[in-house]
Image (tube, helix red, strand yellow):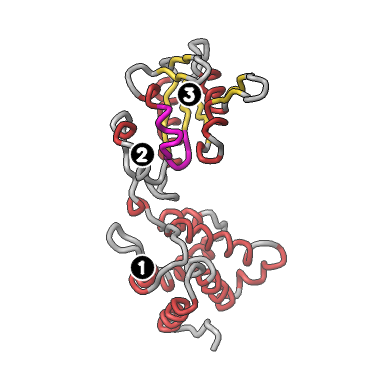
């Protein structure tokens, strides 16, 4: 699965796993690891230069443990991290018709029928044609779901229906509606008129917004805010500035400030 962070890749795996468990009557397990968080030698194994002793790598240990026909369950080994030629090229024998992991110490561990290896990556820019041609590629675009389902699911988790309706009013007023071709007026303005210090997806920024808003409005010490619509809207805009607009430079923050003030019909922004 290839696509940006927050695009729904992990949820696709989870949904497919639960569906197969229900239809096949067999338990499915997934084992995740990040190949870029460790050295290639730590992934596959290495020989100690002093003692000559072989140390089994993390991926090699996972591969040996789950590739057993005695297991009464199916296993998905998921590489959840960036694809890099340093480690992916060593998997070519696993991905081709041989389906055998060959290690530097001479061990050859075949893949069994109850194991599949999958990759959850953001881009294939560093993958060679040999690797890409050996795997099935499914691209998940950032516009397939976008930010609206994430924010809507968060709103529906609030207990009070009146509070949900108030939040939806704020969302329509300050962020807007999202479609396949239009991310909403707020993100549309930022995309066309500003530049971020570092790139972050819309889902990531909305997730930051919801966490910041929860922290400032939920809890015993802040329970009085829920009944104060104007105070709640001010916190909403504050969280919007420090999540959606957090990665903007000073000049672009001024542009975003002017855009927010143009939409401020309730005078919630400070003078």
Q: Is residue 100 left or right of residue 162?
A: left
* Image position, residue 246 (x, y; %): 51, 68
Q: Could you tell which of marks 2 and 3 lies nearer the N-terminus?
A: 3
- Going by the picture, which residue comes out furthest to the front? 50
Q: Which residue is located at x 45 percent, y 19 percent?
A: 102
Q: Earlier in the sequence, mark 1 or mark 2?
A: 2
Residue 141 shown left or right of residue 77 in the figure: left
Residue 22 placed where, x, y %? 43, 26
Name the residue carrying label 2. Answer: 127
Tag 1's secondary structure?
helix
Disc 1: which residue: 191
Whether 199 is drawn above or below 94: the answer is below
- Residue 122 vs 178, above or below: the answer is above
Residue found farthest to the top: 70
Of tags 1 and 2, which is closer to the observer? 2
Which span is picked out in magenta?
79-91
Residue linked to disc 3: 75
Q: Secondary structure at mark 2?
A: loop
Given residues 43 and 182, the one toward you in this image is: 43
Q: Which mark is residue 116?
A: none
250 and 66: which one is in front? 250
Give coordinates of residue 235: x percent, y percent: 57, 73
Q: Position of residue 34 (x, y in %)?
A: 52, 38
* Mark 2 nearby-residue class (10 Å; few <14, some 14–19, many ≥20): some
Outermost bottom residue: 271
């Amino acid at each position: 699965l290839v696509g940006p962070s927050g695009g729904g890749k992990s949820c696709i795996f989870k949904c497919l796993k639960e569906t197969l468990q229900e239809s096949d009557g067999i338990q499915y397990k997934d084992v995740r690891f990040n190949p870029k968080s460790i050295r290639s030698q730590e992934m596959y194994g290495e020989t100690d230069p002093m003692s000559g002793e072989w140390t089994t790598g993390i991926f090699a240990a996972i591969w040996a443990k789950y590739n057993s026909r005695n297991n009464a369950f199916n296993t998905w080994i998921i590489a959840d991290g960036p694809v890099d030629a340093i480690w992916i090229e060593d998997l070519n024998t696993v991905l081709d018709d041989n389906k055998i992991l060959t290690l530097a110490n001479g061990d050859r561990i075949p893949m069994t029928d109850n194991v599949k290896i999958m990759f959850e990556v953001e881009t294939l820019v560093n993958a060679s044609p040999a690797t890409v041609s050996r795997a099935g590629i499914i691209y998940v675009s950032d516009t397939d779901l976008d930010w609206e389902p994430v924010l809507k699911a968060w709103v529906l988790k609030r207990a009070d229906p009146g509070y949900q309706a108030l939040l939806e009013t704020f969302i329509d007023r300050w962020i807007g509606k999202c479609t396949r071709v239009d991310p909403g007026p707020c993100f549309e303005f930022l995309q066309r008129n500003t530049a971020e210090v570092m790139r972050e997806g819309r889902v990531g920024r909305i997730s930051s917004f919801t966490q910041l808003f929860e922290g400032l409005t939920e809890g015993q010490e802040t329970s009085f805010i829920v009944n104060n619509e104007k105070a709640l809207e001010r916190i909403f805009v504050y969280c919007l500035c420090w999540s959606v607009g957090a990665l903007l430079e000073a000049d672009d923050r001024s542009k975003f400030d002017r855009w927010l003030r143009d939409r401020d019909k309730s005078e919630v922004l400070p003078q």
